[in-house]
Amino acid sequence: MNSFWEHPLIETAARYSVVILCLVIFMAVFELVTRYNNWKEIKDGNLAVAMATGGKIFGIANIFRYSIEHNDSLLQTMGWGLYGFFLLLSGYFIYEFLTPNFKIDAEIENDNRAVGFISLVISVGLSFVIGANII
């Protein structure tokens, strides 16, 4: 039975399923910390929210990519993915803190595409830095 769980197709399906579940949970956490409703704003055509949300999704997926690449067990992959997510989340709060002249969430909610784009780039950039440190 052990060889069943070690088959590459089964391992891939398991890791894929875990990443999708984590992505849903992590996006729900991001939904809680933003002042706007991501999916309502995206449905209404708010490109700034779409860019910021897309950056978060890419960032989380990229962190898990590194985690899968550098870890043999599913539990280690999940642990590093969770740790990476919290680092990405802290980067979001640092970004908000370092821009005292305006509120990031308010600007993104108002479809300020420049702020949405910077948010996307920060999420993507931080995901590469976080991923590079996963062992």
Image: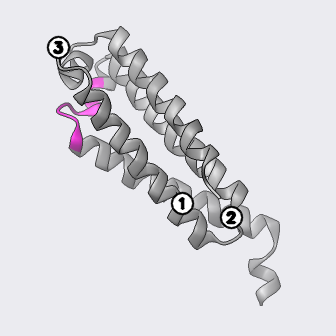
The residue singled out by tag 1 in the image is 80
User: The N terminus lies in which quarter of the figure?
Assistant: bottom right
Amino acid at the residue labelled 1: Trp
Label placed on residue 93: none
Q: Is residue 24 magenta?
A: no
Left or right: where does residue 133 sit relative to residue 45? Answer: right
Contact, CB < 8 Å: mark 1 with mark 2? yes
What are the residue bounds of the magenta stretch? 33-41
Contact, CB < 8 Å: mark 3 with mark 2? no
Left or right: where does residue 113 sit relative to residue 10? Answer: left
Q: Secondary structure at mark 2?
A: loop
Mark positioned earlier in the residue sequence (3 or 1): 1
Mark positioned earlier in the residue sequence (3 or 2): 2
- Residue 94 found in image quarter: top left
Q: Secondary structure at mark 3?
A: loop
At x 60%, y 45%, the residue is 131
Mark positioned earlier in the residue sequence (1 or 2): 2
Q: From the viewer's perspective, is residue 46 above or below residue 67?
A: above
Label placed on residue 101: 3
Which class describes the residues within 10 Å of circle 1: few (<14), some (14-19), or many (20+)? many
Q: From the viewer's perspective, is residue 58 above or below residue 2?
A: above
The residue singled out by tag 2 in the image is 71
Real-space Cα distance between discs 3 and 1? 34 Å
Residue 61, image x and y in percent? 56, 44
Name the mark nearer the viewer: 3 or 1: 3
At x 29%, y 10%, the residue is 112
User: The C terminus lies in which quarter of the figure?
Assistant: bottom right
Which class describes the residues within 10 Å of circle 3: few (<14), some (14-19), or many (20+)? few
